[in-house]
Amino acid sequence: MQSFASFRLRLLLLSFGVVLLTGCARDVPTFTPPAERPVARIDQPWPHNALLTLAYHDIEDKDPDQRFVAVRTDLFVAQMGWLHDNGYQPVSVDQILKAHAGGKPLPPKAVLLTFDDGFRSFYTRVFPFLKSMNWPAIWAPVGAWVGTPDDKPVHFGNAEIPRERFATWDQVRQVARSGLVEIASHTENLHRGIPGNPTGNLEPAATTHRYDAKTRTYETDAAYRQRIGSDVEQITRKLREVTGKSPRVWIWPYGAANGETLDLIHKHGYQMALTLDDGLGSTDHPMSIPRLLVTDSPGVSAFSQAVLRAEARPRMRVTQVDLDYVYDPDPAQMDKNLGALVQRIADLQVSTVFLQAFADPTGDGLAREVYFPNHWLPMRADLFNRAVWQLQTRAHVAVYAWMPVLSFNLSPMIARVSRWDPDHPNAAPRPDPTQYQRLSPFAPKARAEITGLYEDLARSAPIDGILFHDDALLSDFEDASPPALAAYRQAGLPDSIQALRADPATLQRWTRFKSQALIDFTKMLTEHVRAVRGPQVRTARNLYSKPILNPASETWFAQNLGDFLKTYDWTVPMTMPLMEQVHTSRSMAWIDRLVAAVSRHPGALDHTVFELQARDWNLPGQPPVSSHILAGWMQHLQRLGIQNFGYYPDDFVENQPVLKIIRPAISNAWYPYR
């Protein structure tokens, strides 16, 4: 017979097991039938008029030299065989431009083959293969390299390379006559680096305003356009003389694009421009076609995996970083801080950093200084460019400039967002002290100066995108400034807050007007940034959780999820349960509600980054959220099928969140792949 003690032990263990199962059950997502589950991009039909573009450089029979991004000849042939066997169809520039103009669409699994720099191996190894397969391609020589005299070495970066490694203009002429290969421009002599900031980082010459260490000044816009324009003129004329026709395709050195240069090449008749961004291209955007760089001479298995990854939607794993943590009045210490940040981001193995471009040491959200040269605000330090460049080249992440939309400490003569106080209806409206101190988006001078600030930002650094901060909001008592009231009147609305709130229908019209006004302003800012930096710049915007969970609360924020999804590349909901006064014990259920609300919009999850909180701003001292809790939220999102998420802030100084805990939960390269 069992002893009473043994019985009690079994009962205790059974009870403990029930508790464990109950706890686990709270974190199990609702069952989704297979037919309702998301379909992977590679299992979906090929998008209409989409194309995969491959970027090759040198081809060598043995020991491929990675200084030239070389691929071994037999592996190149095997890669072409894999494309053929798997239904990929090489397309020409003519086909792409005709599809862009509304003609015959591209075939499914269209692939564009490109070869950069002008290596002789294209003439001796690739061209014969293309002729045997009757496959079109693009060859893009650098004018200065191919034009080097026969008895001189080629100046390739910091090295002198034997002349025979590069083709001659006569070989380019022969290839062009075939009609099979399009000769593109890869610049005359801009495939090199120039100083891009006071620390001397070498950045792409075609897209960078040169920094002069002697004068401590940057190249002016006029000097930049003169330098670039001269190069474009030279290579365009040379290719026309050699091939007998004007070049139509521009290939950016290092894949780095620039809107000002794009404007110049467009005036010279170029109709396509190719970068090294990720993903499939589209004939809808011929001046910004991404390419997959084929590097490290991959075998067929690695090559095929890279191709399939390029076809998939990107997985955004994001950390948002305060550059204020890096700044130090001591340049040596600031340099150490930047190195520590870059190393941490590299160790995290995330895909993207939302990087603060403005200074906010007091934490009130008002930008009184910025970290880049500009015409409007004091520069705390010329730090942003260097941080972007180091993160991109050493940590291999995309960098979005995180900027306010309205919270700038510009001239006091500019109207501020003002609140009408219903408790004191006869008092003059004034800025709400509990909110961000914002410039009125309806004030023309505010719009002009903020736009100028964004243009200076775009000139300052090779950003991949912009994150519009959460200060772009208007409450149900804002904006009551004179320019705002004038804008309402012009739109056919009442010109007093009291009248605007008088009935539900008018209140709804006013809310939608404000929501759209903020959207339109950010769209204008985007256009100006892209005009400077290029059309490849992506957009993201923070969104409060309440307008998602309760659409009626758009009235309190002038933010609307549907508007965001239609406007920005990425919508970034602030997935911050503690900030919303939700206890950690109920946080998973709250996250479930938020995800469910977003997922009710078709396709929304592919364009949404759920941003978690890494600090508890409700507690004294704003302590870090437990790294285990933060990692648990991330893992819960993944179990819900969410691929795009991140957190704010990252404190590299204090290792918060703890690297070894957070990395397996956020990194594409770690969990659950390692």
Image (spheres, grey):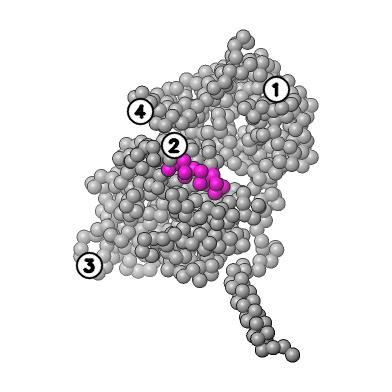
- Which residue is at the front of the view, 51 or 467? 467
Name the mark on residue 424. Answer: 3
Q: Residue furthest bottom?
A: 1
Rendering coords of residue 299 (x, y %): 74, 37
Q: Name the residue under label 4.
A: 217
- Please name the amino acid that badge 4 sits on: Thr
For marks 3 and 4, the one nearer the N-term is 4
- Residue at disc 3, secondary structure: loop
Q: What stretch is highlighted in magenta?
A: 337-352
Q: Name the residue under label 2.
A: 386
Q: In which quarter of the image is residue 484?
A: bottom left
Q: Quadrant of residue 306?
A: top right
- Residue at disc 2, secondary structure: helix
Name the mark on residue 121. Answer: 1
- Please name the amino acid that badge 3 sits on: His
- Residue at disc 4, secondary structure: strand
* Residue at the image position 26 percent from the left and 50 percent from the top: 415
